[in-house]
Amino acid sequence: MRIIGATTRFGLRLIGVTLFVYTILFLTPGTLRVRVAEAGDGGTVQRRNGVHHNAEQDLTLVDGDCLQAGSDGATLSYNSEAGRLVGVGPGERHCVGGIIDVPGGYLRWLGKAVRGDLGHYYGTPVLERLGVHAGRTLLLVSGALVLSLALALGLVVVDLLRSDSRWVGYAIQSVTAVSGLHVIVLCFATMGLQWAVPNTGFSVWLIIILAVGNGTLADYYAILREEFGSALTQDYVLAAQGRGASFLLHATRNEMALGLLEATSSRIPTLIGSTIVIEWVFSYLGLGYDIVKAIQGRNFEMIMGVTSVLAVVLIGVLESAGLARRFLDPRIGGRS
């Protein structure tokens, strides 16, 4: 039942997010573009600013523009919906955009998306491009999470083993202070030091910037330090140490796993946002770079495609974290 409930919530949230983005794009001036496929005779166009002129074939209309068909009628092609044709009868008036057109347009987009048709991006199927670039973004995100956890665990172990060393304390404070810097600052600092420059594709520095600059390192360190410190005072850990066993092997509990789960799931949205900044600054071809280029070019289909992928990832992380939380903490499962 939990899996069914999670699946239902996943679907409803995904529909809600994509419908919200679709509505915003549909109503944003200049985003929705329509081409006059057939103009006929005597047709006129009224721009959203009130200017009138003759309707001509291949003329581009945007939200708020209206076409008054002549005696022969006209045909419009909605390029935001893979060339959907709209016929305008003789003497009829058709305005582009408007909230009344959102439900039908979204249902058409959703139907095609379910069938795997997300449209095209400069001649390339959106789904094909996303399939390639999603893996590149996943490499950055997963690499940053693993590196953040490894660095945090190393700091905690050093802190516990050499807690009496002043220099160890200074080093840990320095690392946690640097982790408080924003990704944007670290991006330009790295570029200034020429450790990584734009247009070079993947670099390990991109993972380091993302791992340090999104705050997950500091969160991981705080959680691990608190949990290890608390666990070391437990009787079973002291008994294990008395027998000569390593305290690190015994100072693990479900609470620590829960803490790491909370820190990771809460940081994923910030991590995705930071990835967009890094990909754009360094011209790294991932989902972040794609969505910025699509926004600049007002490419309706690409924006919706990237939004759908990111929504699937973020909603999937939230639902998976909820299920894992119930598994790790029986008290939560008992209340659900």
Image (spheres, helix red, strand yellow):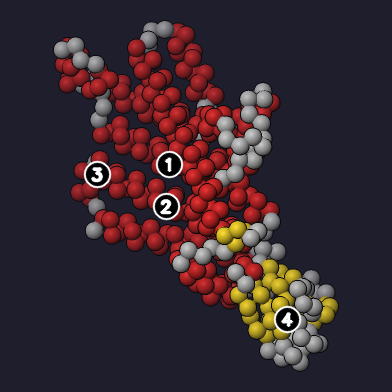
The type of residue carrying mark 2 is Ile
Q: Which residue is mark 2?
A: 315
Q: Position of residue 188 (x, y in %)?
A: 66, 30
The label on residue 138 is none
Q: Nearer the viewer, mark 1 or mark 4?
A: 4
Residue at 49% in and 23% down: 176
Q: Nearer the viewer, mark 4 or mark 3?
A: 4
Q: Earlier in the sequence, mark 2 or mark 4?
A: 4
Q: Earlier in the sequence, mark 2 or mark 1?
A: 1
Q: Position of residue 297 (x, y in %)?
A: 69, 56
Q: Earlier in the sequence, mark 4 or mark 3?
A: 4
Say how many tags the image has. Answer: 4
Measure the alpha-carbon separation of dots 1 and 3: 18 Å
Q: Which residue is mark 4?
A: 38
Does 274 sit left or right of 146 as displayed?
A: right
Q: Position of residue 125 (x, y in %)?
A: 57, 60
Residue at 35% in and 26% down: 224
The type of residue carrying mark 4 is Glu
For the question of whether residue 105 can be seen, the reply is yes
Q: Which residue is mark 3?
A: 327
Q: Earlier in the sequence, mark 3 or mark 2?
A: 2
Q: Which residue is mark 1?
A: 266
Measure the alpha-carbon separation of dots 2 and 4: 43 Å
Does 5 sit left or right of 147 as displayed?
A: left
In which quadrant of the rendered view does residue 61 lie?
bottom right
Residue at 57% in and 35% down: 202
Q: Earlier in the sequence, mark 1 or mark 3?
A: 1
Circle 1 packing at 10 Å, graded few (<14), some (14-19), many (20+), is some
In which quadrant of the rendered view does residue 63 lie?
bottom right
120, 99: nearer the viewer: 120
Measure the alpha-carbon separation of dots 3 and 2: 19 Å
